[in-house]
Image (cartoon, coloured by chain):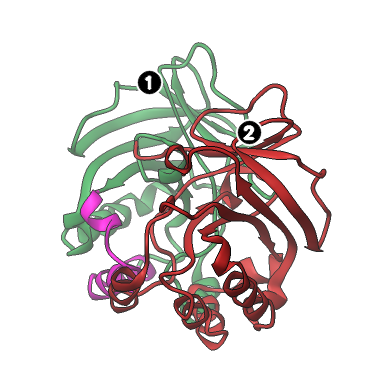
Chain colours: A green, B red
Amino acid sequence: MHTTLLSFCAGDHGPWRVVGQTTFIGAPLPAASFLTVDEAGKDPGSLWTLKGFASNLRYTTAEERTRLNARQAPLGRPGATHAALIPIRKSERWWALAQDERRAIYERSGHLAIGSRHLPAISRKLIHCRDIGEPFDFLTWFDFTPDNAPQFNDLVAALRETEEWSYVDREVDIRLQWTGDRGASH
Amino acid sequence: MHTTLLSFCAGDHGPWRVVGQTTFIGAPLPAASFLTVDEAGKDPGSLWTLKGFASNLRYTTAEERTRLNARQAPLGRPGATHAALIPIRKSERWWALAQDERRAIYERSGHLAIGSRHLPAISRKLIHCRDIGEPFDFLTWFDFTPDNAPQFNDLVAALRETEEWSYVDREVDIRLQWTGDRGASH
């Protein structure tokens, strides 16, 4: 039993302060002030909690993984006091596609290339939640130093222009700043 | 929120009678007498409950799906009074492989070809449960008429000889017979 559910809990306190919340498509989330990321369950006083799990690779090939691993940096580096939580849902049309059809769109969209351009500046983690009845399919989490915030904006702007993003039917972009000792967070 | 958890609940009553339970590899499950398959939660009086969800295709290509759909029959046909529940876990070595490596093993193993040989005689459903902290990764469910039981034995014997199955580290094979009106079951 390898699974650890990770929770993203919005409320009136927490180590991450919300500095921006933008709904790109679909229903918004209630405006949050603070966010806590942890492996515990829902805080009873929270505004909302999104949860999910890390999983095996769904599209990345062995060669792509080797190239990514050579360049990417872990989350939680000293100075990486800026973060983004971007919950995403894809349409039923996307999920009805077979594996090779989804991989082809991912490839044509240059998803990996766009992300790789911003390594090691932008660190990321992909959390899955479609299969557990959550309102989103993925919770994407990123952290970076303040001077790399413009790079992060370029990254998400480029992804939003892709064919793959035409299948996204709900996306909320939440920007965060760390309020305490960076060492203690994810 | 598309997810429906499906439960396989073993106990001292239920519409499916257990007629055989064999552990092929790894820890056994407590010996069951009856099984209930439904969308509800755990029966408080049950011996064990395994649960999981249907999900999007993980390996099948569009062309393969078209060929499968042209041949396969739905579960719960009149006369399909025999069934099998085969919970399977794959090793950490399998899950650490990238998508293309897992697909290559699936292909070399002739997984799809072996299953296709027995269509439409054997109907199947794949339930996922690795990502929700269950003791198995998959719950595979099959039904067939009594005269197709030998075909089903050929099917699982052939799969167990494959390279893919060298990554299976827990497998229990539970055979069942329907005790009531076949129309009411999955």
Residue type of the residue flagged with mark 1: Ser
Could you tell me which residue is drawn at 56 percent across and 67 percent down? Answer: B147
Q: Which residue is mark 1?
A: A33
Q: Quadrant of residue B34?
A: top right
Residue B4, relative to residue A56: is it above or below? above
Queried whether the magenta region covers residue A107, the answer comes back as: yes
For mark 1, name the chain. Answer: A
One can see residue A161 in this view: yes
What residue span does the magenta drawing correspond to?
A91-117
Mark 1, Cα crowd under 10 Å, few <14 / some 14-19 / many 20+, is some
Position of A47 compared to B46: left or right?
A: left
Q: Quadrant of the C terminus of chain A?
A: top right
Q: Mark 2 highlights which residue?
A: B14
Residue B49 image-quadrant placement: top right
**Separation (CA) of disc 1 from disc 2:** 50 Å
Determine the chain carrying the residue at label 2: B
Q: Nearer the viewer, residue B55 or B162?
A: B162
Q: Is residue A165 left or right of residue B176?
A: left
Residue for point 49% across, 73% down: B99
Determine crowd level at label 2: few under 14, some 14-19, many 20+ residues with C-alpha closer than 10 A. Answer: some
